[in-house]
Amino acid sequence: MLNRFVVDNLEFAEMKWKAMQAGDAGEAQLRILLENYQLTEHVLFNVSLQASGKFQIDCIVVTGGFVLVLESKNIAGELSFEENPTRLVRVRNGVVTTFESPEIQLERNMQLLRQWLTRHQISIPVIGAVVWTTSSYPLIMKSPKHLPMMFLSTVPTFFTQQQAHFPKILTKEDCSELTKLLVEENERCKFSRYPLFPRWQTKVLSIKQGVRCVCGSFAMQRNKSSWHCEVCGIYDKRAHIATLKEWFIFVKDTISNREACYLLGIESRHIAKRLLKSAGLIETGGGRSIVYKWPW
């Protein structure tokens, strides 16, 4: 996706984008595992909540005896959990990279979740663990001291052990009510991760025009009511939607008719309007001030 954009710090943007993709892949692996084992029906992913501050948790598992917070990390290499200052140091292919300690992140989220539960007058233990979701397990050179960290395959065993350790406090109905409350709060506090360039304080210098084909080229041309790729020959009526999504992911949370004409490489404002509407975007404003938003 990034090859459409010329930015002032491409190396940094590529690093952040790869980290995001790795994180998303890791969370998907955790989701598949929990769904396959069916440990409990009360499992939520990417939950945004508000306590003393706004926070987001990768995975929350509600049980009758405890609430489990899981933070998934997809970081490969040789890992050391350092102190003074607290950080995670990764060595991979001779390159040293530092990250915020997953242990600190997990502790912060657990504390905020406890605050949130207290505010809603719910008394139940909150426990947590960091789950490594990499396809090749990292080599832990120096372990953390306080909170458990595990590989993906050991999550079911850890969950069963915790269930045996904590007595039940909440009934099935209580668990359902707490899960419903978390879902409702998440909808109110939902965190918008896009657009990325403004979040990364990365300036866009130029944008490559044209609709990207599935073959990777920017050779799509408008042919009556469809798009035709001059490289691979494919026809696709909805090819513009993926290109529009790239804009919303990286550049801005709105797009105007004029910006769409430039991005898609078309001259007709009328065609641009039809394409924007066909993409299922949310129209806001009126007259010449109309802009469109992606329905995240």
Image (cartoon, rainbow, N blue to C red):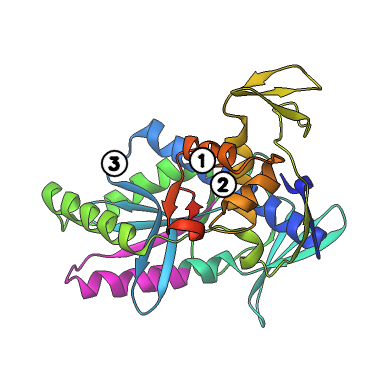
User: Residue 153: x and y, percent?
Assistant: 51, 39
Say which element carries label 2: helix
- Quadrant where the N terminus sits is top right
Task: Please give the name of the residue rendered at 44% of the width and 61% of the height, measured from the top-left corner.
Answer: 191
User: Amino acid type of disc 1?
Assistant: Ala
Circle 3 residues within 10 Å: few <14, some 14–19, many ≥20: few
| Mark 1 vs mark 3: in front | 1
Foreground of the two, 273 or 52: 273
Position of 288 with respect to 242 (left or right) is left
User: Residue 22: x and y, percent?
Assistant: 64, 47
Position of 69 with respect to 139 (left or right) is left
Q: Is residue 87 visible?
A: yes
Task: Please give the name of the residue rendered at 74% of the width and 59% of the height, measured from the top-left corner.
Answer: 13
User: Amino acid type of disc 2?
Assistant: Asp
- Pointer 1 residue: 28
State which region is magenta. 107-131
User: Residue 64: x and y, percent?
Assistant: 20, 52
Say which element carries label 3: loop
Circle 2 residues within 10 Å: few <14, some 14–19, many ≥20: some
- Pointer 2 residue: 24
